[in-house]
Amino acid sequence: MLIRHAILAAMAASAVAGAADAHAVFSEPRAIAGSHWAGAIRIGHGCKGGFATTAVRVEIPAGILVARPRPKPGWTVAIEREALPAPVVIDGKPVTERVRAVTWTGRLPDEQFDEFAIAAKLPSEAGQLVFPVIQTCEGGEARWTQTGPAEGPRPEFPAAVLTLDTSVEHRSH
């Protein structure tokens, strides 16, 4: 009986620690600058109190002018667009507006995780792109929107970050 209580206590402690460590991250956090890219933001539990996730909103950085969400069975997707100040030609096609944000609405139980995919034409400059993510829960929301210095402590609610490299040699495996 004592061993059973110790195991249950350890499981409870790891569940609490896991909730504190939850965040929205890219399943592959590096990409090649200027490329056509498809990536996914992984959403873990993150909802306090064991509540299910009911929506995931991903803000698209201003440097990305073309973005497309992947549909998810059982979820609806809404795309927010904004007009560009002037038309831009990308891959031989005029672009007059860009995707500002994508929101998937559905239900993800707290004990599960999922990925929310986006395809985009990435900017040609190396560096980091920050994707703020709002995870709506049945009992509130988790705002994964914070950024911090590269060498400093990780923010409590970090935004998803995609690092753009200039060549394949710089990609992590």
Image (spheres, rainbow, N blue to C red):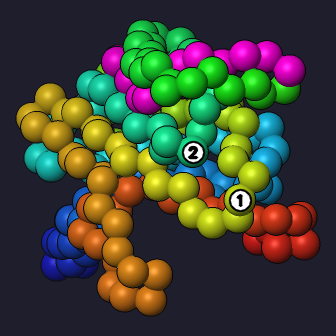
Q: CA distance from mark 1 to mark 2?
A: 9 Å
Residue at image coords 38%, 23%: 103
**Residue 33 located within the stretch drawn in magenta:** no
Q: Quadrant of residue 31?
A: bottom right
**Residue 114 versus residue 149: which sits nearer the camera?**
149
User: From this viewpoint, is residue 113 visible?
Assistant: no
**Residue 21 versus residue 70: which sits nearer the camera?**
70
Please provide percent x and percent y for residue 170. Answer: 82, 73
Task: State whether residue 63 is above or below residue 165.
Answer: above
**Tag 1 and tag 2, C-beta contact below 8 Å:** yes
- Identify which amino acid the numbered label 1 is placed on: Glu
In this rendering, would 48 be left or right of 132?
left
Q: Which residue is under mark 1?
A: 125
User: In the rendered structure, which segment of residues is drawn in magenta?
Assistant: 92-106
Near mark 1 (Cα within 10 A), the count class, few <14, some 14-19 or many ≥20, is few
Q: Residue 173 bears which disc, if any?
A: none
Please provide percent x and percent y for residue 127. Answer: 63, 66
First of labels 1, 2 by sequence position: 2
Please provide percent x and percent y for residue 105. Answer: 34, 18
The residue tagged with tag 1: helix, strand or loop? loop
In this rendering, would 13 be left or right of 131?
left
Residue at image coords 79%, 48%: 34
**Quadrant of the rendering where the N terminus is positioned:** bottom left
**Quadrant of the rendering where the C terminus is positioned:** bottom right
Q: Quadrant of residue 90?
A: top right
The residue tagged with tag 2: helix, strand or loop? loop
**Residue 114 versus residue 116: which sits nearer the camera?**
116
Most common secondary structure along the magenta stretch: strand
Q: Residue 63 bears which disc, if any?
A: 2
